[in-house]
Amino acid sequence: MAYTDIDTSVLIDLPDDAPIQLFDLKTQQAAIRPALERRWIDILDHGRYIGGPEVTECEEKLAAFTGAADAVAVGSGTQALVMPLLAMGLGPGDAVFIPGFTYNATANAVLLAGAFPVIVDIDPKTFNMDPADLQRRIEAVKAEGDLTPRCVMPVDLYGLPADYDAIQAVADAHNLRVVADGAQAFGGKDKGKWVGNLAEITATSFYPTKTLGGYGDGGAILCQDADFADRMRSIRWHGTGDNRKESIRVGINGRCDSIQCAVVAEKLGLFEAERARRIAAAAVYDQRLEGIIDHQIALEGQENGYGLYTVRVRNRDAVRAALSDAKIPSGIYYDMAIHQMPAFAHCAEAGSLPECEKAAQESLSLPMHPYLSEAQIHKVCDVLIAAHNA
């Protein structure tokens, strides 16, 4: 079946028997391997494995790409969440509002900083934090009086930016800071602005399967305030000053090494072409599944970065088994809401976050990467629709 309103010309052609992969890092690596090998030889030659020129290059390219005032490369996406909270001086008795349908790193970061995560329900169409429920939770915390609201940490789930216009309005009304967890959404946009420049502070991850991933752990903090970025540079080096000897604040070992920064800097050269393929692949999925299977929906003015393509199916186990039988991989990233995990059960009561709990039962992620062929996407849809309707 042809879709004349979708430009699939950017999608690659593959043999009919080519395996369908949930992610494809090998094809991407082949395209940049010679350049990476040259970069690694440079690193071996200069010997600055920590804090080499590749770190500065990566930071400058990230800031230029996103429009952020500055970027600070760090050792992981989790560190990128913890460090801004440390810089803000958060600690016991402080409340940070997070969505309940996310990776456990979001909640861990708040607790590691010494604060308390207050869990907010999600919008069932976007899978992202519900601004109306955020307002209710802030009011409830204030009424109870045991915690002091300090910060909101939305998550750009699966690649889709949170509703920052609405969330920022709520945060401003209560004098709260906003730290965005954009780990899955590099390449997403809202009203023409990139993720990384939608909130005051944005954390992202360079985990290998992210839209902009390294070949190990890594991440970055993107800031609209260059002075705050400088504070992050101090915190990532144990809170030291320029001489890297005297601690002038509490810090951690949060450095990103030169090799990972070299990989990310090189991958940025491929990024827009890969993003175009992700968008084309998602457009085929959207049109095939529209009116049949619910999928993540962007708000007006938003563009999904498509780190993942996620649908909702009520018979998820049967659907996933049918996909597996057809040699089509799929992923269930969150089969529990945050408050359903033992480590965070004290943060919310069972049943108090119904949309998070429902999403954990129904969400299913399909193959999504820049090296899918149109035929492969149609095969995924054929099997998915048949299993859903069975």
Image (cartoon, grey):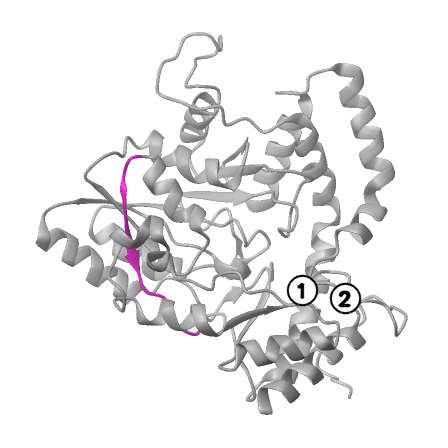
Q: Which residues are magenta?
A: 114-125
Determine whether the residue tagged by mark 1 lies in a helix, strand or loop: loop
x and y, in percent, of residue 135 in the image? 23, 61
Which residue is tagged 2?
372
Where 128 sits versus 270, above or below? below
Q: Quadrant of the C terminus?
A: bottom right
Residue 94 vs residue 317: left or right? left
Quarter location, residue 265: top right
**Residue located 65% across and 84% down the image:** 288
Q: Amino acid at mark 1?
A: Met
What separation in Å lies between label 2 and label 1 (alpha carbons)?
7 Å
Asked if one can make out residue 242 in the rendered structure from this viewpoint, the answer is yes
How crowded pointer 2 is (Cα within 10 Å; few <14, some 14-19, many 20+) is rated as many
* Residues at circles 2 and 1 in contact by the CB criterion of under 8 Å: yes
The label shown at residue 368 is: 1
Q: Amino acid at mark 2?
A: Leu
Asked if one can make out residue 123 in the rendered structure from this viewpoint, the answer is no
x and y, in percent, of residue 186 in the image? 57, 51
Determine whether the residue tagged by mark 2 lies in a helix, strand or loop: loop
Where 365 sits versus 4, above or below? above
